[in-house]
Image: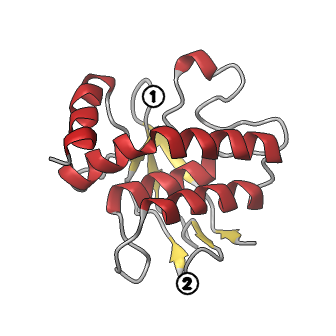
Amino acid sequence: MGIFSGTLRIDFVDGFRWALVRTSPAFQWTGSVFPGAVEPPDRMVTDFGSIPHIFAVWLPAAGMGHRGQWGPATVLHDWLYLCQKRPDGSPLSRREADAVLKEAMRDHGVDRFRTWLIWFAVRLFGWIWWAWFRKTGPSDPLNAAVPASKYPLAIWYALTGA
């Protein structure tokens, strides 16, 4: 089991994205997947999970769930997909990033079914976004929300390894 510390504070950016605001102490999570605390940086842009609108009734992207919120876990996951590094700077695997999402959701009180459902969907489709960020790298500002107009290009990167 891991532990969250600090406060997740966000500013609304546009119709579907938010930017993190630095707090003291900083928002972070420490778990058992790897040593060190995952601490998304100030002003990182997130969409709280790329959940298709058709599923938003059951799984709202911001994560206001029935028995807990997955929003904080998705922010950590977005940061890990964006940087693809562990807190110590060593390379991070996609499997580890997805394990952080799963463990952090459980730590934040998300029920087992929703945790499994979100984790399973990420395991099925996350390779597309992982490939996108591997190809494009972190941008300025640190934008972890891929616009829908870039989905075909992201899929191309994922399929070709380009």
Q: Where's residue 139, x and y in %?
A: 22, 51
Q: Would you name the residue on which mark 1 appears?
A: 16
Q: Look at mark 2 in the image and give the residue it sits on.
A: 35
Examine the rendered structure and indicate whether residue 93 appears above or below residue 112.
below
Report x, y in % for residue 45. 39, 46
Of residues 5 and 63, the one nearer the viewer is 63
Kindly identify the residue that appears in the image at 53 percent across and 82 percent down. 36
Determine contact: label 2, label 1, CB under 8 Å. Answer: no
Q: Is residue 38 left or right of residue 82?
A: right
Q: Nearer the viewer, mark 2 or mark 1?
A: 2
Q: Is residue 5 above or below residue 22?
A: below
Type of amino acid under label 2? Pro
What is the x, y in percent for residue 97? 50, 61
Which element carries disc 1, helix, strand or loop?
loop
Q: Nearer the viewer, residue 8 or 132?
A: 132
Q: Residue at x 61, y 54 (%)?
A: 73
Q: From this viewpoint, which residue is outermost toward the front?
A: 160
User: Is residue 48 at least partly visible in the picture?
Assistant: no
How many residues crowd around disc 1 within 10 Å: few (fewer than 14), some, or many (20 or more)?
some
Q: Tag 1: residue type?
A: Phe
